[in-house]
Structure formats: structure tokens, C-alpha cells
Image (cartoon, helix red, strand yellow):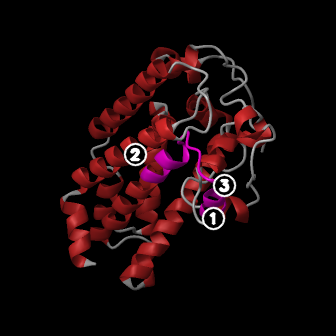
Amino acid sequence: MGSFANSLLEHEGLIRLSVFGGMLALMMGLEALLPRRARVQNRVGRWRTNFALSLLNSLLLRYAFPVLAVGAALWAQAQGWGLMPLLGLPAWVELIATLLLLDLAIYWQHRIFHVTPFFWRFHKVHHSDQDIDTLTAIRFHPVEIIFSMLIKIALVITLGATAEAVILFEIILNATALFNHANLKLPLGMDRVLRLVLVTPDMHRTHHSVIQTETDRNFGFNIPLWDRLFGSSCAGPQAGHLGMDIGLSAYRGPEPSQLGWSLALPFRANSDRTPKK
């Protein structure tokens, strides 16, 4: 794994940007050819706002967090801190275990952000999008991104995860998020097979339903195992994928497509709902 790890570290930025850009272009192309649902909002406004949020978050992380998850991994590794160094596992076993544990943590973070009113105020910016497509995957409030990074740094240090594992996980997470948010119509047979090991667009779309009992299901981003294991799995929306409404019931106007409104939403006095525990 030495040469692979060195290549990841040396070309991290280029690799991450290439995978992100390639996956984004692929999903947008497939959405144009094989759309699952008709859009209900003008895509220009939505895309402009979602891209702006993503750019703002990228700049925030770059300049406000001199030590990101990869830096935290390198620091913990130099100190010999964390669970993984204590276990002394073979490198390939440690890599797989780290990827699975990080994915499990993302599942529980996502679930906690739904059931905790403070975190939900910021996470609902993601859910307020009234269409769901691959660009919904980059629509997050900057405050949520900050908390997510702090949680990730703490977890990386606790695990003693290698920098290579962290880079690989983030590449996989970004790619799968772009995939499972896509407005993409997969053949039913393909979806049935893929959802055994991977969260598919039909699975995650249910999570963006306006019906709260569906919104509070299918929290996984990478693999569906955690939803099945912890009882949060849902086969599909009650109204079907063509009949379901996307977003939040309190925000059905054009406002979610506006950047200023999206940034201000968590700070409004009235929360649209209190998630069920």
C-alpha cells in the first residue's frame, strides 16, 4: 500500500477535485438523459444557490480550519494516538475497518442532526430543496459544515485513522453523495441489486420526502447496512417516486432557491417542525 498511500497524499487535491468534477459531470449528464422526476422549480436559481453554498463552504474550511481531517490524521499518527495503532491490525484490515467506522459515524451524525432541534435548524437547509438532484448533495449550511468537520476531526483522532484512509473515505463519500442524490432513473432490476450494497437514488430520495416519517428514514450515504441494522430503513415513499413531494411542507415557495434566504433560515425564530425521536 506504500506507493498507493504516497500517491494519495502527494496528489490529494487533484485526485479529490478530479473525482468530484468527473462524478458531478457524469451525474448531470445521466440526469439529462434519464430523469426520474420532472422538476418543480427553475434549475438556474437552485443550481446557482447550491453552487454558491458549496463554494462558501469550501472557502470557509480552507481559511477557517488550518487543520482539517487529513491534517488531524497526520498529527494523531505522529503522536501514536488512537484505537487503530493499539490494535495492530494488518494495513488492509485497518483500512477497511476505518472506512466502515467512519461511515457508521456519518450515519449516526446524520440521524442526530435530525432528532436534535439545534442541529436540525441548520440541516433543514439541505432538506428545504424542493427538487432533488446531484447538486442537492452540495447544499449544506456553513454552520452545519463546521460542526461536521469538528466531529470528523474528533473521530479521526479517536480512531487514529491514517491520512490515506481519511482521504479515501472523503473521496468515496463525495462520489456516493452525488450519486444517491441524483435525479436518475435506474432500471428496477439494477436498483434492486445495487441497494443490497450501496445507497441508490431511489433509496435516498425517500429521505427527502415532505412526510416526516419518511424524512426520518434512510439516513445512510454510502452503504444501506446501518439503516437495516438500526431500524431506519424504508423501501420507498408512500406516494411513489413520481407522486411524492420533495422538501419541507412549511417552505413551498421559491425562497429555498435563494442564497440569502437559505443562509438566514436557521436563524428564524420559528422552526417548521420538531423531528421525532
Q: Is residue 24 left or right of residue 119?
A: left
Residue 14 image point, x, y percent: 22, 51
Q: Is residue 75 above or below residue 200?
A: below
Residue 21 in the image, given as x and y percentages of width and height: 32, 44
User: Is residue 15 on the magenta stretch?
Assistant: no
The quarter in which the C terminus is drawn is top right
For mark 3, give the secondary structure. Answer: helix
- Which stretch appears magenta? 175-195
Q: Circle 1 is placed at which residue position?
A: 193
Q: Which callout, 3 or 1, points to the residue nearer the camera?
A: 3
Q: Earlier in the sequence, mark 3 or mark 2?
A: 2
Q: Amino acid at mark 1?
A: Val
Residue 188's mark? Answer: 3
Residue at 64% x, 65% y is 196
Structural crowding at the residue carrying mark 3, measured as other residues with C-alpha within 10 Å and reported as few (<14), some (14–19) or many (≥20): few
* Element assignment for label 1: helix
Do callouts 3 and 2 mark residues in contact (Cβ within 8 Å)? no
The kind of residue tagged 3 is Leu
Viewed as shown, does residue 26 lie left or right of 233? left
Q: Which mark is residue 26?
A: 2
* Crowd rating for badge 2 (residues with CA inside 10 Å; few <14, some 14–19, many 20+): some
State whether residue 166 is above or below residue 114: below
Instruction: Please state which of residues 92 and 131 is positioned toward the viewer in this rendering.
Output: 131
Q: Residues within 10 Å of mark 1 (few under 14, many from 20)?
A: few
**In the image, what residue type sits under mark 2?**
Leu
Examine the residues drawn in magenta and state their main secondary structure: helix
Disc 2 on helix, strand or loop? helix
N-terminal-most mark, 2 or 1: 2
Front disc: 3 or 2 = 3
Residue 194 magenta-drawn? yes
